[in-house]
Image (cartoon, helix red, strand yellow):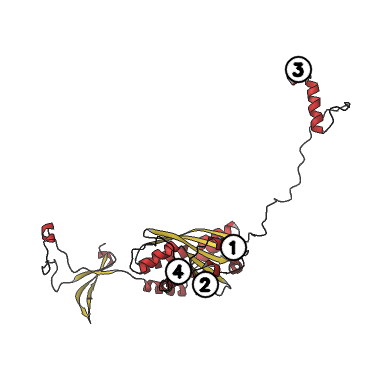
């Protein structure tokens, strides 16, 4: 039986009002005054309440973290250029993100065994850490030792022979950090040690804040991350300069003579392939498969003619073949003007 068939609508309304008001429905009904709708009372605004985690204090704003990410883009370009020349293979590197976290959170991300470099950033006080993905690190080692640049299927620790080679790679990467920091602090990175066990990399107490700059590096078919961990104590003196506006103003200044000298020195150390073409010939497939030891192939160049000398894929010089000591050599006899270079 429905409620409306027992009680009238007025009685139903009275019962609902008694329940919502906390009255006893069985108590004698008292006279009621119609309620006048009152405007909703709101508390005076006293500022927005935000949760705060004392175990993970936010010492850097999102804008400052974004500035740190932009700062390290020249660092990524420098890594790609140096490793491309050092490994004689095309390398790409880009900054993925810049985040703030506790050192404990970062240390839990480190593989064991791993590949980590600890270094200082004078005149800033303290030590920072650079960690390279083991797959990427072993691919670099394989390339340096004459392989195609592939990582082993099973993760292992670096051998005693591999450690000095990897240390040299890490030193070359760290040398590019001034490219990122020269607008906020004139640092001079100094390599301290290569570490393979993350349990021995106690830079700061576990609850201290650090900044983690993540880079993605690819080499041939191998790719992996490059993590740059910088404690907040190192960054704290330059925090006021971590703004896009400040970097924009500083970026408009002219390049200093010291920066130009450093750029020239790096360019002078770069390796480029130089090829001398002795000559070319056209043969049939039948002639090619019938070649035997002692056969001759007639080239389209003269015995004393000048040979094209290629730098990369462009003809930059002409020269004559010869010997220098016990080695074959070529003597440059003509420089090709830039407008006449052929790609």
Q: CA distance from mark 4 to mark 3?
A: 86 Å
Q: Earlier in the sequence, mark 3 or mark 2?
A: 3
Mark 4 = which residue?
173
Seen in the picture, residue 47 relative to 335 is either above or below; the reply is above
Left or right of 153, for residue 249 = right
Seen in the picture, residue 230 relative to 25 is either above or below; the reply is below
**Disc 4 + disc 2, Cβ < 8 Å:** no
Mark 3 = which residue?
5
Q: CA distance from mark 1 to mark 2?
A: 19 Å
In the rendered image, residue 186, in percent from the top left (x then y), is placed at 53, 72
Mark 1 = which residue?
104
SS at mark 3 in the image:
helix
Mark 2 = which residue?
119
Q: Nearer the viewer, mark 4 or mark 3?
A: 3
In the rendered image, residue 177, in percent from the top left (x then y), is placed at 49, 69
Q: Earlier in the sequence, mark 4 or mark 2?
A: 2
**Disc 1 + disc 3, Cβ < 8 Å:** no
Q: Toward the viewer: 293 or 46?
A: 293
Q: CA distance from mark 3 to mark 2?
A: 85 Å
Q: Count neighbours of disc 3 (C-alpha within 10 A) and say few if under 14, some if 14 to 19, many if 20 or more.
A: few
């Amino acid at each position: 039986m429905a409620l409306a068939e027992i009680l009238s609508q007025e009685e139903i309304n009275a019962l609902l009002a008694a329940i919502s008001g906390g009255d006893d429905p069985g108590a004698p009904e008292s006279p009621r005054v119609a309620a006048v709708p009152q405007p909703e009372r709101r508390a005076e605004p006293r500022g927005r309440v935000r949760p705060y985690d004392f175990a993970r204090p936010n010492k850097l704003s999102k804008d400052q973290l974004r500035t740190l990410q932009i700062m390290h883009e020249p660092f990524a370009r420098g890594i790609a250029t140096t490793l491309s020349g050092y490994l004689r293979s095309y390398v790409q590197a880009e900054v993925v993100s810049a985040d703030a976290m506790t050192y404990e959170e970062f240390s839990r991300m480190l593989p064991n065994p791993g590949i980590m470099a600890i270094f200082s950033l004078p005149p800033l006080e303290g030590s920072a850490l650079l960690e390279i993905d083991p797959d990427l690190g072993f691919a670099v080692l394989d390339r340096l030792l004459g392989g195609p640049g592939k990582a082993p299927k099973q993760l292992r620790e670096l051998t005693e022979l591999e450690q000095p080679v990897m240390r040299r790679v890490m030193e070359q990467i760290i040398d590019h950090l001034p490219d990122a920091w020269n607008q906020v602090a004139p640092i001079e990175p100094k390599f301290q040690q290569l570490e393979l066990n993350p349990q021995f990399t106690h830079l700061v107490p576990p609850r201290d804040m650090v900044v983690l700059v993540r880079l993605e590096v690819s080499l041939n078919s191998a790719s992996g991350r490059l993590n740059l961990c910088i404690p907040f104590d190192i960054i704290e003196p330059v925090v006021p300069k971590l703004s896009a506006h400040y970097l924009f103003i500083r970026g408009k200044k002219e390049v200093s003579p010291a920066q130009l000298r450093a750029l020239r020195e790096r360019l002078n150390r770069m390796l480029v392939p130089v090829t001398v073409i002795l000559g070319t010939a056209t043969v049939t497939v039948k002639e090619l498969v019938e070649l035997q030891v002692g056969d001759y192939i007639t080239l389209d160049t003269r015995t004393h003619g000048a040979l094209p000398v290629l730098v990369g894929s462009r003809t930059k010089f002409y020269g004559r073949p010869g010997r220098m000591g016990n080695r074959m050599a070529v003597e440059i006899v003509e420089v090709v003007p830039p407008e006449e270079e052929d790609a």
